């Protein structure tokens, strides 16, 4: 119930392409869904987050799509750049409790 | 505004020893969370402190403990170190105003147990 399932485990996208990472959850009490970006040797940095009352949120090249009925949410990176190469984690939480993380997606954007 | 800081950056210990890791939250943040990022295991929740009190702990043995000081900084202690405790330990802080859901992470402490 506390799991967040993330796919794919790794992703290779050409420069300028769209990167798509998917997550699914079981616990309907979750009310906050952030995405974090992590570079090697660094801590995770918040990219974008969404609440379940919104179906989509866009910030620059990053978009979260949220499907409450399917209990799924996804991250779209438009016009992917080599600098976007990193590991991406989806997460979920409720009531300021712990973040439950997905297993991570290693993204490589080829030049 | 300074971010979350953690010390030390790296820590090397031998099995059976104790490790102490420190975290300073963003100024004004009162909640501190600790996570373990072990190779192949993703990010696992360890402990949550808020206003000096332990609010929740993850599925870790009692060897993992901590505390939060009056200035909201926090310390994670790991006793009787085992080889599998080798990991990146991340601290995150959360405030009570603005984006109150958001946890901001520090750079982590890399603990190596030999």
Image: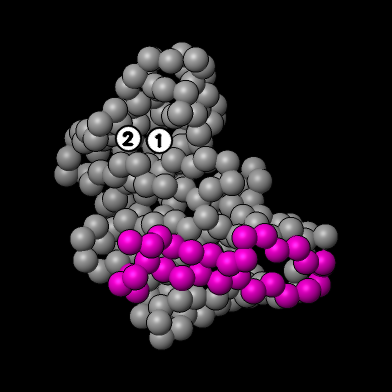
Above or below, comparing residue A50 to residue B16 in the picture: above
Mark 2–mark 1 contact, CB under 8 Å?
yes
Q: Which residue is mark 2?
A: A73
Q: Could you give the CA–CA distance between mark 2 and mark 1, rounded to whole angstroms?
A: 5 Å
Among the two numbered marks 2 and 1 on one chain, the one whose residue lies closer to the N terminus: 1
Query: Label 1: few (<14), some or many (≥20) within 10 Å?
Result: many
* Mark carried by residue A23: 1
Q: Is residue B20 magenta?
A: yes
Above or below, comparing residue B69 to residue A37 in the picture: below
Q: Nearer the viewer, residue A53 or B91?
A: B91
Q: Chain of mark 1?
A: A
Q: What is the x, y in percent for residue A83?
A: 45, 28
Could you tell me if residue A76 is visible in this image?
Answer: yes
The magenta region covers B1-30
Residue drawn where x is 49% and y is 29% of the image = A85
Q: How many marks?
A: 2
Quadrant containing the C terminus of chain B in the rendered view: bottom right
Residue drawn where x is 24% and y is 57% of the image = B99
Residue B2, quarter of picture: bottom left
Q: What is the x, y in percent for residue A39?
A: 52, 40
Q: Is residue B114 magenta?
A: no
Q: Nearer the viewer, residue A101 or A69?
A: A101
Residue drawn where x is 75% and y is 63% of the image = B12
Residue drawn where x is 41% and y is 43% of the image = A36
Query: Label 2: few (<14), some or many (≥20) within 10 Å?
Result: many
Could you tell me if residue A98 is visible in this image?
Answer: no
Above or below, comparing residue B83 to residue B74 in the picture: above
Residue furthest front in the image: B1
A10 to the left or right of A34: right
B82 to the left or right of A102: right
B18 to the left or right of B24: right
């Amino acid at each position: 119930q506390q799991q967040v399932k993330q796919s794919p485990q790794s992703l290779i996208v050409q420069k300028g392409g769209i990167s798509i990472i998917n997550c699914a959850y079981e616990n309907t009490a979750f009310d906050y869904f952030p995405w974090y970006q992590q570079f090697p040797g660094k801590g995770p940095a918040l990219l974008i987050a969404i609440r379940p009352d919104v179906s989509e949120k866009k910030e620059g090249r990053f978009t979260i799509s949220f499907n409450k009925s399917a209990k799924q949410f996804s991250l779209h990176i438009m016009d992917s750049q080599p600098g976007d190469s990193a590991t991406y984690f989806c997460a979920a939480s409720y009531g300021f409790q712990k973040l439950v993380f997905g297993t991570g997606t290693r993204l490589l954007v080829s030049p | 505004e300074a971010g979350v800081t953690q010390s030390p950056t790296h820590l090397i210990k031998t099995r059976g020893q104790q490790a102490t890791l420190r975290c300073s939250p963003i100024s004004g943040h009162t909640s501190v969370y600790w996570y373990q990022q072990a190779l192949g295991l993703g990010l696992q929740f360890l402990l949550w402190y808020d206003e000096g009190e332990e609010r929740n702990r993850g599925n870790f043995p009692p060897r993992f403990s901590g505390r939060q000081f009056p200035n909201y900084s926090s310390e994670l202690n790991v006793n009787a170190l085992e080889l599998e405790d080798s990991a990146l330990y991340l601290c995150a802080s959360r405030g009570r105003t603005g984006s109150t859901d958001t946890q901001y992470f520090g750079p982590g402490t890399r603990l190596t147990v030999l």
